[in-house]
Image (cartoon, rainbow, N blue to C red):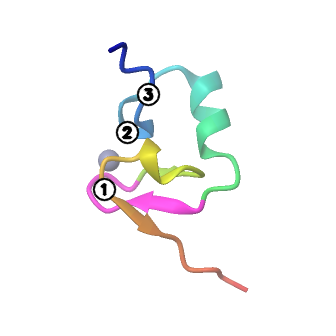
């Protein structure tokens, strides 16, 4: 197993981070990171549509 599914919370590569956080649909309840894929944050909470 090669844990390639990085969590946004732990990502330090800005290019990767940019890709993961584009068009975010989930935020992390623990650290506030946002991501498009709920698997990318450690404690995903769906973002409320603002409009
Ligand atoms: Zn987190």
Q: Nearer the viewer, residue 4 or 47?
A: 4
**Left or right: 5 in relation to 20:** left
Quote the CA–CA distance across marks 3 and 2.
6 Å
Q: Secondary structure at mark 2?
A: helix
Residue located farthest toward the bottom when viewing the structure as drawn: 51
Q: Magenta span has 26?
A: yes
3 vs 1, front mark:
1
Q: Secondary structure at mark 3?
A: loop
Q: Is mark 2 within 8 Å of ligand 1?
A: yes
Quote the CA–CA distance across marks 3 and 1.
15 Å
Name the quadrant containing residue 18: top right
1 vs 2, front mark:
1
Q: Nearer the viewer, residue 12 or 38?
A: 38
Which residue does the image show at 37% across and 39% down from the upper left?
Answer: 9
Q: Which residue is mark 3?
A: 11
Q: Which residue is mark 2?
A: 9
Q: Which residues are magenta?
A: 25-32
Tags 3 and 2 in contact by the CB under 8 Å rule? Answer: yes
Quote the CA–CA distance across marks 1 and 2.
10 Å
Q: Secondary structure at mark 1?
A: loop
Relative to 47, does residue 12 appear above or below in the rendering?
A: above
Q: Which residue is mark 1?
A: 43
Looking at the image, is mark 3 or mark 1 earlier in the sequence? 3
Relative to 49, does residue 44 appear above or below in the rendering?
A: above
Which residue does the image show at 40% across and 36% down from the upper left?
Answer: 7
Q: Position of residue 33 (x, y in %)?
A: 43, 50
**Left or right: 43 in relation to 40:** left
- Mark 3 neighbour class, 10 Å CA radius: few under 14, some 14 to 19, many 20 or more: some
Q: Position of residue 46 (x, y in %)?
A: 48, 70
């Amino acid at each position: 197993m090669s844990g390639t599914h990085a969590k946004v919370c732990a990502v330090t590569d800005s290019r990767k981070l940019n890709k993961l956080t584009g068009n975010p649909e989930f935020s992390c309840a623990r650290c506030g990171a946002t991501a498009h894929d709920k698997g990318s944050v450690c404690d995903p909470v769906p973002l409320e549509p603002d409009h």
